């Protein structure tokens, strides 16, 4: 009986000690993509030119609430860059870009131009089969070094018609694929200052175009550096480098 009594006392003592234990709060991931309305970032290109991106009030699209990016100077209609969208949304530690309009514009410009070069002097029209464009998964928390994710993957079909004649109509297919790859985490120096814990992420873009059994591919890499509680501080691709020179966060 004495042994049983001592055992029960020991158990009660353990529970009593445990009740006074202070639980540490769960560690939250830092915000690498501040998305408050009014946030503004100013960048400088290698040639000295400046441009800015600001988050402004959004819009409803496909029953989803989007915020809008406003660029100064405005992005040229002919410029094709999946990673410079006009709208985006934040959902459960993920940033999605709305890129449907960019795909339409790419097909109606680049594809149409290449086909017109092949059939010079002829009237050329391009039609796209109705489709629901997925969003581009630009960013997700947590970022993990040496990891990858499928940011965007879609096939678009359509038809090319010459001289407005059905007999001179042939199909085309375009496959858009973007993969994000987290390379490393470290410090980075920019005109806006020196930052720690910056993640370097490469976006690998491949566009495969098939027309009349002829395949043509476009490959592009774009590297972006993210800093906690600041956002994007550096962008590098075949056009050069853009670095953050100043920013304002709400």
Image (cartoon, rainbow, N blue to C red):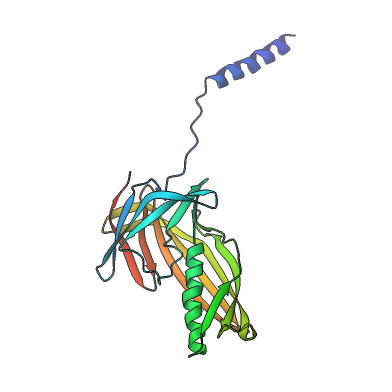
Query: 95 or 89, which is in the foreground?
Result: 89
Residue 206 seen by the camera: yes
* Residue at point 55%, 69% (across, down): 176
In the image, residue 52 above or below residue 64? below
Provide residue 81's location: percent of width, then percent of height.
43, 67
* Residue 177 screen position, x and y as percent: 55, 68
Q: In this view, does 189 lie above or below 20?
A: below
Q: Count the labels in the image.
A: 0
Identify which residue is drawn at 57% across, 22% down: 18
Image check: 213 left or right of 27?
right
Residue sitting at the far front = 164
Vertical position of residue 108 compared to residue 1: above or below:
below
| Residue 42 percent across, percent down from the top left | 29, 57
What residue is at 48 percent from the left and 64 percent from the top? Answer: 101
Q: In which quarter of the image is residue 235?
A: bottom left
Q: Residue furthest top?
A: 1
Q: Which image quadrant: the N terminus? A: top right
Which residue is the extreme one toward the left? 48
Q: Residue at x 62, y 83 (%)?
A: 169
Q: Is residue 204 visible?
A: no
Q: In this view, does 120 lie to the left or right of 190?
A: right
x, y percentage for residue 225? 39, 59
Where, quadrant-wise, is the C terminus in this rendering? top left
The quadrant holding residue 44 is bottom left
């Amino acid at each position: 009986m004495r042994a049983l009594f001592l055992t029960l006392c020991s158990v009660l003592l353990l529970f009593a000690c445990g009740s006074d234990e202070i639980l540490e709060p769960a560690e939250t991931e830092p915000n690498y993509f501040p998305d408050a309305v009014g946030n503004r970032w100013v960048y400088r290109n290698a040639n000295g030119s400046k441009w800015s991106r600001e988050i402004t009030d959004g819009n409803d699209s496909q029953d989803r609430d989007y915020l809008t990016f406003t660029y100064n100077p405005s992005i040229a209609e002919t410029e094709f860059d999946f990673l410079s969208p006009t709208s985006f949304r934040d959902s459960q530690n993920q940033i999605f870009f709305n890129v449907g309009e960019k795909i339409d514009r790419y097909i109606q410009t680049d594809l149409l131009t290449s086909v017109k070069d092949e059939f010079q002097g002829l009237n050329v029209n391009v039609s796209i089969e109705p489709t629901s464009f997925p969003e581009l998964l630009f960013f997700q928390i947590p970022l993990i070094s040496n990891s990858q994710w499928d940011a965007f993957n879609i096939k678009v079909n359509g038809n090319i018609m010459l001289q407005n004649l059905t007999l001179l109509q042939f199909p085309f297919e375009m496959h858009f694929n973007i993969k994000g790859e987290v390379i490393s985490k470290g410090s980075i120096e920019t005109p806006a200052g020196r930052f720690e814990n910056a993640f370097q992420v490469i976006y690998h873009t491949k566009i495969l175009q098939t027309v009349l059994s002829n395949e043509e591919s476009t490959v592009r890499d774009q590297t972006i550096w993210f800093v906690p509680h600041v956002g994007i501080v550096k962008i590098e691709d075949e056009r050069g480098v853009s670095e953050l020179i100043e920013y304002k966060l709400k």
